[in-house]
Amino acid sequence: MITGETTATGPGTALLLAAAPLGKGRLIDATRVLGTLAACPPSSLLGTAAGTVVELADPTEQQAVLTRIRAAAAAPGPLTLLLAGQLHHDARQHALHLALARTTPSTLRYTALPWAWLAAELKPRRPGTTTVLADLVAAPDTWQKLCAEGLTLGLGISLYGRVTPPPPRHRTATPAYLQAVASIWRSGLNPPLTELHAKAAAALAGQGEALLLAADTTHAPFPTHAPPGTPPVAPATTEDPLPALLAAARAGQHDQAAALAARWEGWAVQAYGPASEQAIHWLEVRADLARVAGDPARSCELWMAAVDARLTRHQAPDAPEVEAAVDRAHHQWQAVRDAARARALGPRLVALRRRVPGRRPGATEAVQRRLEFLHTMPQTLSTLR
């Protein structure tokens, strides 16, 4: 439906997608929320005074849903996507899918919507114009994966909502999060996203285990449009993502923190180049996150990659940043207790130490001695004591 009058910011688009398999595979009564959302003020759904609201109730065709999403994503104004449904993990392709009405475990890849397709359609949109509110149930084989890795849609997109574990047998979950959001909107309130999410989450407190989604990356320093050859310009940011990343890691959410840091690094590589200071910064953040997660081998690999990147941008071997990165790689390598991993990493570290000996006398020789010792150990010995 079309509602309101066109404004200077352009009409908005709201896509309401509620879907779950028919029959015994249904974990959530997703379409139950559509009537409540339809009764909300259109401006709350759209983010503008005018626009189009599209409703998809238990769609069956994968390609048809993709076409609708693609059309909504192509609209120039603000886009609000409200999702109610259930997520499944395809063990063969290691990919998440949003189940549709005809989805079964054996036909997942052909009858469900891959989460990666959704992310790909939203990726080209102008940062800060896309909001996704999700109320999802995870299938039994998917819940632990999501708890470990989190759920995101990429930079520039605001993703809020919740994911819950599968309900007990013979029971069906309800999209209570989106119902709470709708209740807030119907009361006449239209708070900012962070406040809206907090109110909806608070209304559901004590109703069981849930993974809350609050991935707002719209304040990232995205490059503005500029003539070819002009370096991207970063506008002022309203929040620094680094403290939140480190806090998540210290809280044990290591995979989620690492995945988000990798996305920031990917943006920096695209915007400024792989040897840029911005990209190297995020590479070093990832290295430190691996240390916090207790994975010294991965941390060593990433610190060595940071050294390579700094040398590629013609930083001197005795530059403080280069020496510090090598020292950290060396320190993490010494903490690796898996002999095979340590042996595999050692030659690269030796080569870097020869280029960047650092200020610790005998550092290069120390790496060589430990590597020689590792090679004298039995190949079947997997750990160092």
Image (cartoon, grey):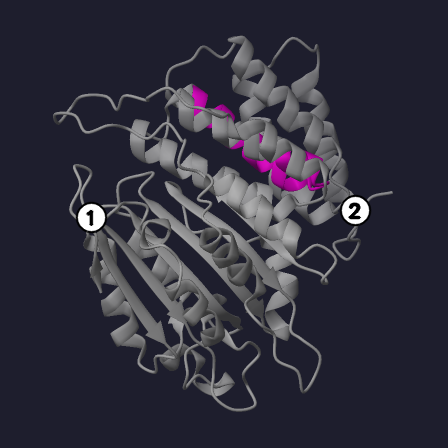
Q: Main secondary structure of the magenta part?
A: helix
Q: Identify whether 203 is placed above or below 67.
A: above
Q: Could you tell whether 148 is left or right of 311 in the image?
A: right
Residue 47 in percent (x, y) is at: 32, 46
Find the magenta span and give its range.
289-310
Q: Is residue 316 visible?
A: yes
Question: Disc 1 designates what residue?
Answer: 11
Q: Nearer the viewer, mark 1 or mark 2?
A: 1
Q: Nearer the viewer, residue 145 or 130?
A: 130
Q: Secondary structure at mark 1?
A: loop
Label 2, residues with CA under 10 Å away: few <14, some 14-19, many ≥20 = few
The residue shown at (37%, 36%) is: 267
Q: Nearer the viewer, residue 136 or 103?
A: 136
Which image quarter is the N terminus in? Answer: bottom left
Which image quarter is the C terminus in? Answer: top right
Residue 144 in percent (x, y) is at: 66, 63
